[in-house]
Image (cartoon, helix red, strand yellow):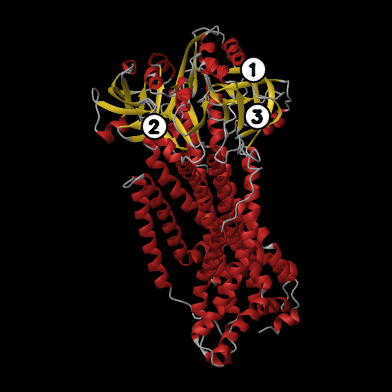
């Protein structure tokens, strides 16, 4: 039976090629996702593992102790005198002072453009020559010398190369702190580690005293102390000795424990990327499974007499099943191997794409773990075997006597079981979707329920599609006879002849377009909601922000407040911390200026009640925690926990996207670096708005990442961000649509082969080649439009179902992009025409006499 299966597979290479391609694409996405994220994780792990000294002494952080990754940036410092005192501890070989700027510092090139800054940070620290875990210096000089005076800097070799600077040049820089601008003379270039793999970040090394004077108010402080153990002293022993000599507000940790902690944080942060990519791989595999089911169903139907002869020659039902599954296994192996190789190429492409936004992995070799190959083959083989199992079972039910008949067909399963299964899946999917949208569980549980609900609903509709398809096709093709005569009538009847096949082919396109339509509805609703929000809630005239979403220097707000015609500047800041033990984002603003810039509705208390020692909470936070004005909440920031009094409750607003608002003073006292997230600028009544805008632009002319926008421009930029995200999602979903198109091509091509004798008879009685091509094209158009209409209908349901519960989160306006939806239907019809080109051409080229004599 193995030889029979192998010969059958080799005899139908062209037929199986398109089906195998679906598995190849799905497996490639799975393999590429794992290779890319493993490479990314290894790169960060190498940086973390190779930069930690034996022991680190650093200020204690309440947030780090609680495991809050985002709260790692802190203004906490230690006295520099600790460096000398720790050098006297028994077992210490050397101590080095570390002075790191808590916010980013970016290099500007000759064209005043930021080098990096699109995601990777600009790391500014002092040059010490401290060794790494292997005893070798963390950085080695490539040219020049180390910085040892004010306004001197050394850059890593990649940053210096990208910016086009050489030793002796003056390097302009911008910071996200105070001051906003810096300038220093380049005195050296350095290599970080053996290959300078900084994953796109820039490394800027300064003199210790210069950093203290510039960013720490001239105080003789350090942000941490690196302690190197003497020969024969273990890091654990040294840590215990050092811990006895440090102040109460400091902690001693081994470099290995810090590396492990950061590694866990990296894995947590990168898990989203992997999950995000694997979701689309899963979608591609689900769509591909429709194609595989269809292909094997048609192939088995075409080989029904062959299978009957095998049964007549003594083959058991289980052997017939195995013969079909062996073909699927071989195709899964081939698809898994090809997909694995293509996945490596996809990982290289992802590396290039992420490099374009600042996450440069050019120095990092691709990481290929055995797990990737195991998963790729498991996915490719299992999906193919599962998809081929139903056709294999049907093949086993061919009776041996069927080999003696001229007209033989596979037994069809009852529509009743399909209908019952479809209804049950629909009910289960609707229940899971409802439970997820109502948020009956945790955030991850709700998201999982929504995903299961969408999948269950789609599969339910897929099972019911053969019951729906004949009626819908009859309506869609009702005009065919009138427009195309007998050719149109035959195309309509051919589309209705096998509702299972028509529905399965359309279902692949339905799934892709359902997700695309849902995204279109959510995207249109988001754009409309943002526009409505800006029109009704934003009172300021201009909005100042960072183009890449990072914080920026508070000096910009002070400079803009001095521009002629400016009445007020309202800074808005965001940080991370714990509120009553829950990790969450926290914002801060000046109440008087903010109330004049943004329409913030207070349900209790007033905005101006916010001052040091108090907070404002959202109505959702108040309801969830049973809080009221006068109650106290515990807010934990890097420097510790504080009990603050609730001064007011505000209605949830997109302009305040956090559940808690603090005063600037409390945020700074908690150890959060001073940096603004956004500025709202209000012009004085009667001021020349054009002159005001020129003044604001002049403030940020040397800060390329900072943008000044009017209200309309701000609304447009928010909509553009939505569109950019949607375009990424559309591109990834395009993979599923490509597979769906291949499904139509494959089904039509196999259908032409299956109907070879019929086509020969039609040609014999006078049907021309052009008419035959037209008939196949019309069938394809009906199938494609059927899939599009079902997908759009399902997508509308999903989009509306998701939007309604999100109204309280700012998605208040439901917008249906009817123009886009109509365009999808038209595009589906065009896809139908294009998909039919090759099958129609193949049908028209069949030899009439040979076709008639085909069995």
Q: Do the residues labelled 2 and 1 touch (CB within 8 Å)?
A: no
Label 1 environment density (alpha carbons within 10 Å; few <14, some 14–19, many ≥20): some
Query: Dot 2 corresponds to which residue?
Result: 243
Q: Is residue 438 left or right of residue 123?
A: left
Q: Nearer the viewer, residue 627 or 106?
A: 106
Q: Residue 183 carries which label?
A: 1
Name the front one of labels 1 and 3.
1
Q: In this view, does 761 lie to the left or right of 255?
A: right
Q: Is residue 845 visible?
A: yes
Name the front one of labels 2 and 1.
2
Q: Position of residue 745 (x, y in %)?
A: 64, 64
Q: On screen, 564 above or below 363?
A: above
* Picture quadrant where residue 107 is located: top right
Q: Where is residue 218 in the image (x, y as percent from the top left)?
A: 51, 13
Query: Dot 3 corresponds to which residue?
Result: 115
Q: On screen, 369 above or below 578?
A: below
């Amino acid at each position: 039976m193995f030889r029979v299966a192998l010969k059958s597979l080799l005899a139908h290479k062209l037929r199986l090629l398109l089906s195998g391609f679906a598995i190849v694409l799905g497996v490639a996405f799975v393999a590429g996702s794992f290779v890319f994220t493993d490479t990314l994780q290894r790169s960060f792990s190498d940086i973390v593992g190779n930069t930690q000294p034996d022991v680190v002494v650093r200020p204690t952080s309440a947030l780090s102790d609680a495991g809050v990754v985002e709260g790692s940036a802190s203004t906490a410092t230690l006295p520099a005198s600790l460096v000398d005192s720790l050098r006297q501890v028994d077992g210490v070989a050397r101590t080095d002072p570390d002075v790191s700027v808590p916010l980013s510092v970016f290099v500007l090139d000759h064209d005043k453009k930021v080098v990096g800054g699109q995601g990777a940070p600009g790391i500014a620290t002092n040059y010490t020559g401290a060794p790494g875990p292997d005893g070798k210096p963390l950085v080695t000089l490539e040219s020049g010398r180390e910085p040892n005076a004010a306004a001197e800097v050394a850059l890593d070799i990649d940053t210096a190369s990208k910016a086009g600077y050489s030793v002796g040049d003056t390097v302009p820089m911008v910071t996200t702190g105070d001051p906003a601008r810096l300038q220093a003379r380049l005195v050296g270039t350095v290599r970080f580690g053996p290959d300078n793999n900084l994953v796109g970040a820039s490394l800027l090394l300064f003199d210790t005293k210069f950093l203290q004077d510039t960013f720490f108010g001239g105080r003789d402080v350090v942000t941490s102390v690196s302690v190197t153990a003497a020969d024969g002293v273990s890091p654990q022993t040294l840590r215990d000795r050092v811990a006895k000599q440090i102040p109460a507000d400091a902690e001693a940790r081994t470099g290995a424990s810090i590396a492990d902690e950061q590694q866990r944080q990296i894995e947590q942060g990168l898990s989203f990327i992997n999950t995000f990519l694997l979701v689309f791989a899963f979608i591609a595999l689900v769509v591909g499974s429709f194609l595989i089911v269809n292909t094997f169903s048609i192939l088995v139907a075409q080989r029904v007499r062959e299978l009957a002869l095998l049964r007549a020659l003594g083959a058991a039902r289980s052997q017939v099943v195995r013969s079909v599954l062996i073909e699927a296994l071989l195709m899964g192996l081939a698809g898994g191997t090809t997909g694995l190789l293509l996945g490596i190429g996809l990982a290289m492409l992802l590396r290039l794409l992420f490099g374009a936004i600042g996450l440069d992995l050019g120095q990092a070799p691709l990481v290929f773990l055995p797990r990737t190959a195991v998963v790729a083959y498991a996915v490719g083989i299992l999906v193919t075997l599962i998809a081929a199992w139903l056709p294999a079972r049907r093949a086993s039910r061919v009776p041996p006597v069927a080999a003696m008949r001229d007209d033989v067909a596979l037994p069809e399963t009852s529509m009743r079981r399909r209908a019952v299964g479809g209804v049950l899946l629909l009910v289960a999917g609707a229940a899971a979707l409802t439970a997820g949208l109502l948020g009956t569980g945790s955030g991850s549980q709700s998201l999982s329920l929504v995903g299961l609900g969408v999948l269950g609903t789609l599969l339910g509709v897929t099972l019911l599609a053969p019951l729906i398809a004949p009626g819908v096709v009859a309506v869609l093709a009702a005009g065919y006879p009138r427009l195309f005569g007998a050719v149109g009538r035959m195309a309509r009847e051919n589309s209705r002849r096998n509702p299972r096949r028509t529905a399965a082919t359309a279902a692949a396109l339905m799934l892709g377009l359902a997700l695309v339509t849902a995204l279109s509805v959510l995207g249109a609703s988001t754009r409309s909601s943002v526009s409505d929000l800006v029109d009704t809630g934003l009172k300021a005239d201009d909005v100042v922000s960072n183009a890449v979403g990072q914080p920026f220097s508070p000096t910009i707000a002070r400079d803009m407040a001095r521009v002629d015609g400016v009445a007020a500047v309202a800074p808005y800041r965001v940080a991370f911390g714990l509120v009553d033990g829950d990790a969450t984002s926290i914002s801060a603003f000046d109440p008087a200026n903010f109330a004049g810039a943004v329409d913030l509705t207070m349900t209790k208390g007033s905005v101006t009640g916010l001052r040091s020692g108090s907070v404002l909470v959202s109505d959702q936070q108040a309801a969830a925690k049973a809080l009221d004005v006068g109650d106290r909440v515990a807010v934990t920031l890097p420097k510790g926990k504080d009990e603050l009094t609730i001064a007011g409750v505000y209605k949830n607003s997109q302009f305040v996207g956090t559940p808690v608002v603090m005063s600037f003073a409390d945020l700074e006292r908690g150890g959060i670096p001073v940096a603004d997230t956004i500025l709202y600028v209000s012009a004085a009544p009667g001021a020349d708005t054009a002159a005001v805008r020129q003044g604001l632009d002049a403030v940020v002319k040397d800060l390329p990442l900072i943008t000044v926008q009017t209200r309309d421009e701000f609304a447009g930029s928010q909509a553009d961000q939505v569109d950019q995200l949607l375009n990424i999602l559309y591109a990834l979903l395009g993979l599923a649509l490509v597979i769906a198109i291949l499904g139509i091509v494959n089904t039509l091509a196999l259908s032409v082969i299956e109907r070879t004798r019929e086509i020969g008879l039609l040609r014999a009685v006078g049907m021309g080649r052009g008419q035959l091509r037209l008939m196949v094209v019309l069938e394809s158009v009906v199938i494609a439009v059927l899939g599009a209409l079902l997908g759009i209908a399902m997508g509308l349901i999903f989009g509306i179902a998701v939007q309604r519960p999100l109204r309280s989160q700012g998605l208040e306006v439901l917008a249906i992009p009817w123009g886009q939806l109509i365009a999808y239907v038209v595009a589906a019809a065009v896809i139908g025409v294009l998909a039919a080109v090759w099958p129609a051409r193949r049908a028209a080229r069949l030899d009439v006499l040979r076709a008639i004599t085909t069995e």
